Amino acid sequence: MAAVRYDAATLIEFLQDLLVRGGFSSDEASAIARSLTLSERLGYASHGLAQVGRYIAELSAGNIVSSATPKTLQETANSIVVDAQLGAGQVVMPIVLRNLYAKLATQASVTAAVRNCGHVGRLSEWVEQAAEAGYAALLFVNDNGLNQIVAPPGGRFGVTSTNPIAFGVPLADGQIFSVDMSTAAIALGKVERAKRAGVAVPPDCIQDASGAPTRDPVAFFATPAGAILPMGGAQGYKGFALSIFVDLLVAGLSGGQAPPAAAGTRGENCAVLTIWNPQFFSGLDHMQAQAAKYIGLVKACPPVDATKPVRLPGERTNVARQGGGQEVELSQESIDDLALLATQFGVATTIFKR
């Protein structure tokens, strides 16, 4: 069934109402609704409105705490360690960014380590905000030792999570270069969506419980469970090395956990975010000039297929982000899920009536 387009502002208002009915404060609901709608508009459906039901369930289970106040555990002129107290990620991350921005007035680089945080959503949202402010940024996130779904090369079952990385660099004229990537061959949300849609996942992404490669997402969710492969597939040692690095760095600096998590651990995120101020190095102008020269070289590279010009990593997302837009395209599956959830919480579904 064809996708349907909705006015973004109207959709955000609907989501705010739904999230408040689900137990979030008005301010939290606003931050989450705007973040998820942006992710959906940029094509990150797995980190978009599909998360609404999950967040409400996490709140009910105590894995997210409404109106939590992040606690500073340790702080220096260029670093901070924060216990998010299970606050919503879309509320905690802007607080962390504001703290780091204040430090960047006098520091060349600053780092925040965060533990006990609700799902931070689309990682690139936060590095994009830093890049738009004229800074370069790098963000790592793990699942606090839980969610062991990615197998090591040659392994039969999952030992870690998809451990994503995002980075952003400021370009000239208000443009940015940003990428959001998993250290696994595929994001869990994409496997979930493939299962629901009854379609195969791309090759070299998952394996069944015996360790045999498969494209059937049902095999991943079977009992016993399959596993996601690391970035690079069954021989993805470099991708898995990145995943190990994320776990070791994030757990080690934040005070959180690498796998396996201790008994009773809640399903929260831990994160490490580093931001650089180019003005304390060779200057923002130099960074942007070098970026323009290099990007020009990449874009001028003759394509193998004349109908498919060379694109930068993350280019489609950045074009969509910079283009703004007042509408969001939703699949019928997403519409049905949201309508069902709204009915459960007594929220009007008139937005979906055409």
Image (tube, rainbow, N blue to C red):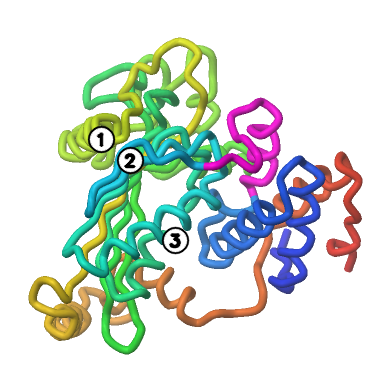
Disc 3 to disc 1: CB gap under 8 Å: no
Q: Is residue 33 above or below residue 239?
A: below
Q: Is residue 64 above or below residue 18?
A: above
Q: Residue at x 41, y 45 (%)?
A: 202
Select label 3 or label 2 by which is in front.
2
The image shows residue 113 at horizontal and vertical percentages of 32, 42
Residue marked by disc 2:
81
- The magenta-colored residue range is 50-69
Residue marked by disc 3:
125
Q: Residue at x 53, y 13 (%)?
A: 223
Disc 3 to disc 2: CB gap under 8 Å: no
Residue at disc 2, secondary structure:
strand
Marked residue nearer the N-terminal end (3 or 2): 2
Q: Is residue 100 above or below residue 140?
A: below
Disc 1 to disc 2: CB gap under 8 Å: yes
- Mark 2, residues whose alpha carbon is within 10 Å: few (<14), some, or many (≥20)? many
- Asked whether 63 falls inside the magenta stretch, the response is yes
**In this orientation, which residue lies closer to the viewer: 63 or 334?**
63
Residue at disc 3, secondary structure:
helix
Marked residue nearer the N-terminal end (3 or 1): 3
The image shows residue 177 at horizontal and vertical percentages of 30, 71
